[in-house]
Structure formats: C-alpha cells, structure tokens
Amino acid sequence: MASDNDTGEKQNGPPPPAAAAVAECTVEEVALVVPETDDTSLPVMTFRAWTLGVGSCVVLIFLNTFFIYRTQPLAISAILMQIAVLPIGKFMAATLPTKEYKLMGRSFSLNPGPFNMKEHVIITVFANCGVSTGGGDAYSIGAITVMKAYYRQSLSFLCGLIIVLTTQILGYGWAGMLRRYLVDPVEMWWPANLAQVSLFRALHEKENKGEGMTRMRFFMIFLVLSFAYYALPGYLFPILTFFSWVCWVWPNSITAQQIGSGYHGLGVGAFTLDWAGISAYHGSPLVTPWTSILNVGAGFIAFIYIIVPICYWKYDTFDARKFPIFSNKLFTATGHEYDTTRILTPQFDLNIAAYKSYSKLYLSPLFALSIGSGFARFTATLTHVALFHGGDIWKQSKSAVKNAKIDIHAKLMQSYKQVPQWWYLVMLVGSIALSLVMCFVWKEDVQLPWWGFLFAFGLAWLVTLPIGVIQATTNQQPGYDIIAQFIIGYILPGKPIANLLFKIYGRISTIHALSFLSDLKLGHYMKIPPRCMFTAQLVGTLVAGTVNLAVSWWMLENIENLCDIEGLHPESPWTCPKFKVTFDASVIWGLIGPERLFGSGGLYRNLVWLFLIGAFLPVPVWIMSKIFPEKKWIPLINIPVISYGFAGMPPATPTNIASWLVTGMIFNYFVFKYRKQWWQKYNYILSAALDAGTAFMGVLLFFALQNEGVNLKWWGAKPDHCPLATCPTATGINVTGCPIF
C-alpha cells in the first residue's frame, strides 16, 4: 500500500494489513498467531506450487504494470492471489492424476496429495515478487519510462532488463547476507507477517456452512459485482471517478473550482465512487488500522484545508498565484508549462546558458509544500523511532547481533538443509559486476559513472541493516530518499538520468532487500525449507522483472502518445501521473539540482527548515506520553504517519486521499466496532475481491474497446468538469483558456 512521491521519499504508507489485529503483539505473544509445529513430510515445491506460483507472479506483475500507467493506478497486493489460488489448488488436488513419474532417477507426481498450507505459502512468495509495491518496485520501470517516454532516449531492451533485474537481485544479495541478523533472531519478529500467518490459518481452517457464507463464496460474489460495476467508472460513466459537484454550482468562479475540483483542486465536497481511485495511492483502506487512518486524516485536514489555503490565498507563498493551486506540472515564471527540451543538451545534460536565458523552475504551491513535507517526514520518522522504540531496538539489536536467542521456530528450521552463504554472494557480486559493465557499455544512456554505482552500493549496504532492524521490530521503514537525492544532486548536478539510477541502486535495492527479508521471515514462521524459499524468490524475481519490463516496453511501443498528456485523447486513461512525478523528480533533483532550488539563493530555500521542524515535532508527544503514562491515546499520535496525510500529492489528489479516509473509517471503525465478527471474517476478503474485479474489468475494457479507439463522447465521459481549476489568479498572467486578472 505504498505510494511513491518521487520528489521526496518512498511513501510506505500506514502499517500493513492486519496490524489492527496483531500490532500490539510482543515477541512472547507471537506463538498465539504462529503455530510451533511442523510436518517435514508435507510436499512444498510441487507441480501445483510451480504452476500457480509462476502464474500468480505473472498475473500480478502484468496487472500492476498495466495499471500503473493509468490516471487512476491500481496497486494489487499479493493477498489477491493468496485467496484466489486456494480453490484452484484444491481443484488441482482433486483432478490431477496421482501417477508417479520418473525423471533423471527421481520420482515425482503431479498430485502428491491434498493441497497443503506450505504449498500455499510458497505460491504467495512467488506472487509477492509480482507486487509493484513489494518484491518488484515500480521505480525501476519508472526510470525506464522516463528515459523513453519523456527524454526520448533510444534505450535498448537489454540495458533496461539489466537495470530492472540488477536492482532486484542486488536487494536479494543484501537480504541473504543479513538474514542471520534480521530473520533468525526471535527479537526480529516482523509484525506485518503475523497478518499473513493469520490469514493462512483462517483460509485452511474448515468452515462450518451453518455459520454463514463461506469466505470463498463471498470472494467470488463480490469479485463478480466489482467486475461488473467497474464498467461504469472505467468506461461508461467516468465522471464517477471525480464527482466534483461544487464546480457545477459555480461554473464561472475560479476560486470555487480551485476549492471544489477533485482532479485539479483541493477537492472540497468532491468524492470518487471508483475503487481504483480510492485505493490508487495509499492502497486498500480496508486493511489499514483505524489509528493509522485517524493520524493520516489529521495530517490531511491540516495540510489541505489549513496550510495550503493560507499559503496560497493569504501569503502568496513561492509566487503561488502565478500557477494552478494543484498540479504535477513544472512551470516557468510566466505561469506556463516548463519546456525541459529547451534546457537539455543532446547528451541529456543541463544547458546552463539556455537555463539562464529561459526561466527558473517553479512548482505549483501544493507540489512545493508536499516536497517540504517529505523533508519533515524523513527527520520526524528518525526522531519518532529513536524516542519511542530506540531503547528496545538497541537491546534487541545487541541481542540479535551478538547473542541471538534460538526460539522454537529456529530450532524447527534446523531440520532442513540450509542455503549456503555463497549462493547469495554470487547473486550480489554478479549483480554489482553486471551493473558496472552496463555503466561502461551504455555510458551515455545511464550517465552515472562507475564510482557513482559503487557509492550507491555502499550507501545501500550501510543503511539496510539499521532500517531492517527498525522495520522488523516496529513495522516502520524510515526512508532516506531525500538524502540520497540531495547528495547525488550536489555531486552530479545537471544529470537527470544519473539521479534516477542512483536512487534505484542506493535506495530501491534496500526496499527490495527488506521485502525479501520479510518473505524469509514468513518462511521461517511457516517452516518452509530454506532452499525452497531461495528457489521461489530467485525464480519469482527473474520472472517478475522480465515480465515487468516486457509489459512496460510493449505499452511504450504500442500505445500512441503514452504519457503525453497533450497528445492523448482527452478521455484517455494513459496519463501516467506516477511517472510524470518521476520525471519531475529527475528535473528537480537531477537536471536543475537542489543547489539552484533549495540552496541559499533558491526560491524554495525556506523549505529546508522543515528538516529541523520534523525532527522536533515528535518530541512533545513523547514528553507528554511520559508525563501522562495513563493516557494510552497519547503514544498513538504518530507524527510520521500524520505526515502521510499529505504524502504522494502529486500524483495523488486530495479526493483520492479523502475518499480513502472515509472508506477506511466506515470499515475499520464503524463495521469493526459494531459488526466485529463480520469484519474478522470478510474484511480482507472484500478488499481482495474489489481489487480483482476492478483489475480484470480494466484489462478487458482496454483490449476490447479503448485499444481499438472506441471512446464515448458525452457529458458523463469527462471527469471533473472544472476547467477553471487549472487557472492562475495572479495579475497579468496570460494562460490559454483562463481569464487575465
């Protein structure tokens, strides 16, 4: 449920699924969720596991890649496949022949017995590699899309494949080297995994039909309903995506449309009835704890309804009125869209003379303040974790590194053949070597020199362990994207592609590593043989990376004007909002550079103070929690999570976040409080069904209608209907379609 604001840090979102149920677990309570038994006779890497595992990986990576280019991207989690493969696995167990075959002296069967939980786990590990916000981060595809669609580079498929696979396998290598510190010790308990374990147990427990509808029947019913419904916002009635009634009441008022537009404004009164719009950027609200929703809501209200209006209408901060109040575009001093081709050399470097004669770079006010919030979020996360979890982390880290306890799970895992360390070292060294070869062979394309790659590798190595300890114990993952981008932006100014690749290898490889480590801990809890885990993760990584790039490459080559908003049909869904922000990031941090924008003479220099403000904000909360220990609600005030209320905008819109908050409140407060049994049985299942139905109808609509140019033209086919929301209000600014003040 991540959303990535590429101008700032990796937006990991509020705590993962089922944290509501298990977030308060201690190490001693893990056994309440995770059984301490194992059956080594159960088959794991069966024909069923291979077929469903690789198939799940391919389906998920295809859907996630396909939807990430759309105006309303849909991030589909592995929970969908975790639920969907269960009836398929049972069907295969009931129908496949049980006859044994011999191959190379070894016997095997297509059907070794009933479909078991270990097979189910290994299939989910495969599927995790196909999740864009988990095992296969979309940022590497974002970089390739920016290189091809925005900078028009003639990048080769082989170079792109090396970029995608090496970033993933690099993280795989880090994970293998750090597993003794972050997987084996009992203190490193990875709270989010307990949700997965709970769901596995729930799915494999026998359900009494007399206790209401079974989970699987519920899933199938709502999958069909979601599939049918998405034909409305997805094709027939797209205005349901941004229902901005305020603009219809005041059709000639710029201010009213700036306030009420769901797509280009603050979204006051606007809402979406599109599940893709609700879950587009923060993931499914159905699987987010109520306390996190409350914190995010507080930050959202403060930012959208107080800070931004004051900065725009009262103080005209950063010349805000020259530009739309909310836009993911870059602007000139005259309020027009910034034409980066005018300041680029043929080598995709900054032409300093052209930059000085053309215009300085400007951002929409909400965009600029969102970047500033990223500064505060980075330091607030570090301070919050240090104050609220520092003592525990220090004790647990010392115990894990020096004197790790061997719990019952580790003892049971010793009965399996372990993965030699050199297997992971080969992956690590191989990915580093291949990356360095790439930087020499495609030197002009990648821009980042060999020492820049080594610097990125060193940075990733230094931070993966401490960040891993924090995530394994507190369920939080501090980002360091801003620091990484600042550093390379100062060292290599004027090189946008180098900035993108440095972030991929220096930061995204860490995200991959932590995803792999989380899966290794899941295998630890579920007693999956380590060599089976190694195989599943490696094969899943290779398959996911290849399919990820292949789908992206096909779309870039075959969808006309993909990501080009000016060249697209007005109702086209292929506007690439996430990758537009990735492109903006390459311009802000790489092409122009932090010195020109945030340095002593930069227009946005005062935003740097938010680093200091963010570091201070958790301190009063911590002090109050110590003064009033009986007030259990005080520690629930989480400044980093509050800051997520305005993270990811753009590409996320206020309407996306507001609708996410309302939906989450309905299910995780009211339904949880008044229909708790229903919530426990069906909540996650409903989330997966909505994801699946929306995704399948979206793909069907594209190939059957949209790809053939069959578009509807009527009032309801155009979302928002707020044309004046994109207008500036400063005196003398002349923009086509807008009045001049």
Image: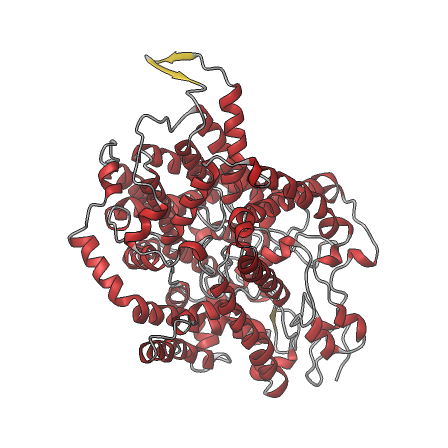
How many marks the image carries: the answer is 0
Q: Residue furthest bottom?
A: 314
In front: 361, or 308? 308
Observer-nearest residue: 96 or 540? Answer: 96
Pick whichever, 85 or 417, lies toward us: 85
Instruction: Say left or right for 374 vs 302.
Output: left
Place residue 632 in its image quadrant: bottom left
Residue 583 position in % (x across, y down): 54, 60
Asked if residue 43 can be seen in this view, the reply is: yes
Query: Residue at point 49% right, 62% down?
Result: 349
Q: Is residue 436 visible?
A: no
From the top left corner, tell me how far across and down residue 690 is, in percent.
61, 47
- Which of the 4 quarters of the picture holds residue 469? bottom left
Identify the residue at the far front of this view.
210
Q: Is residue 333 or residue 280 the one in the foreground?
A: 280
Q: Residue at x 60, y 51 (%)?
A: 69
Q: Residue at x 54, y 31 (%)?
A: 87
The picture quadrant where one finds residue 100 is top left
Q: Quadrant of the C terminus?
A: bottom right
* Whether residue 609 is situated above or below residue 566 in the rendered picture: below
User: Which residue is the extreme one toward the left?
Assistant: 403
Q: Is residue 631 left or right of residue 282?
A: left
> Residue 688 at what x, y percent from top left?
56, 46
Rendering coords of residue 578 (x, y %) = 57, 57
Q: Quick one: which residue is furthest to the right in this view?
A: 714
